[in-house]
Image (cartoon, coloured by chain):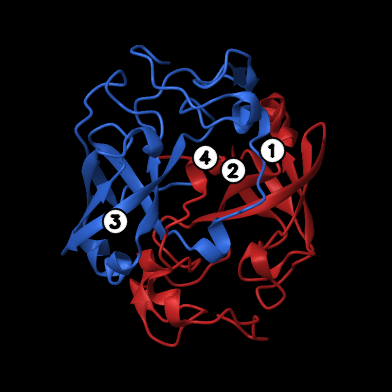
Chain colours: A blue, B red
Amino acid sequence: MEFEPIGVIHTPFQTKEECPMQPMYALGAVGKVEVFEPYASGLRDVELFSHVYLLYHFDRSGEVKMFRPPFLDDLPHGVFATRHPCRPNGIGMSIVQVLKRENNVVEVAGIDVLDGTPLLDIKPYMPRFDKIDDASEGWLSEKPPRPKPAGRE
Amino acid sequence: MEFEPIGVIHTPFQTKEECPMQPMYALGAVGKVEVFEPYASGLRDVELFSHVYLLYHFDRSGEVKMFRPPFLDDLPHGVFATRHPCRPNGIGMSIVQVLKRENNVVEVAGIDVLDGTPLLDIKPYMPRFDKIDDASEGWLSEKPPRPKPAGRE
């Protein structure tokens, strides 16, 4: 199936080395989500939400492997048990904080994607559906949060 | 950009009228997520997580409109402020509970998609990234949860 970018995400991050691994490591990072004109009217009321999901295309990811060690572990896991960008159908997902909207541009905090990333969709974060209080941490359960090393994969 | 299904989602729901609107309305509904063989090894350790995101293609959605009233409200909102299936790039997202995995099939609870829906990706639900405790409800904040009516859009 064929998908088209509906916009582009502007961020401070030009290289993978600069780019945070997840929004929680990028709390200070502000980006601008530009939605192209044909879709701009679909943004109405997005600014009522404190958080949204961005779906986007990992357009600069590397070789797809079915399992490998992710950033947060030294042991290999299946790609579908990780959020690694090198995956079949390179669709990325980040939850970001909505700061404000001006026409077709949504300013967001906690952005963790490369500058120029093609935007596929925006969905509101709805706590009654998305906040799972009893979710397990999977293989992460014994891994403390760790800061991003300089040269992460 | 071109994406290919990596699998197919088997559910009890043959029509939109039967299909729950969100996983929270489908807690008893069990489905099977079949991942095609070339990708099956990527499932390793998925079963360690209690919940996963399914990304899939809304392959039977209707006309895309930039704003309309969603299921949970009588007022129109921009499509990106809703989870409506009729959206540019019809990518759906559901958080489901993992019951078990047998080889290339993951049995899940809380499934809310039509039988035969093409699967695009599976990502683990990681509470440290995905559970946003202070997220607002947006336009939903004054809407009580309501059961799915018989003929929802």
- Whether callout 4 and callout 1 share a subunit is answered yes
Q: How many marks?
A: 4
Indicate the position of residue A96 as horizontal and vertical percent values.
35, 48
Instruction: Give the Cα distance between marks 4 and 1.
Output: 13 Å
Dividing the picture into quarters, in which one does residue A104 lie?
bottom left
- Is tag 4's residue or tag 1's residue first in the polypeptide sequence? 1
Q: Tell me, for residue A98, which label it has, or none.
A: 3
Number of other residues with Cα within 10 Å of mark 4, as a class: few under 14, some 14 to 19, many 20 or more: some
Q: State how far apart marks 2 and 3 are (Cα).
A: 21 Å
**Are the two marked residues, 1 and 3, in contact with CB atoms closer than 8 angstroms?**
no
Pick whichever, A14 or B1, lies toward us.
A14
Mark 2 vs 3: CB contact within 8 A: no
The answer for how far apart the CA atoms under marks 1 and 3 are is 28 Å
The residue pinned by badge 4 equals B128
Looking at the rendered structure, the kind of residue marked 4 is Arg
Residue at 46 percent across and 34 percent down: it is A90
Residue lying at 34% horizontally and 60% vertically, measured from the top left = A50
Residue A22 position in % (x across, y down) = 41, 34
Labels 2 and 3 in the same subunit? no
Disc 3 packing (10 Å; few <14; some 14–19; many ≥20): many
Decide which of A4, A62 is in the foreground and name it: A62
The CA distance from mark 4 to mark 3 is 19 Å
* Discs 4, 3: same chain: no
> Does dot 1 land on a helix, a strand or a loop?
loop
Residue at the disc numbered 1: B49
Q: Name the amino acid, label 2.
A: Tyr
Image side of residue A11 versus residue A136, left or right: left
Of the numbered discs in the image, which one, if any, rests on residue B125?
Answer: 2
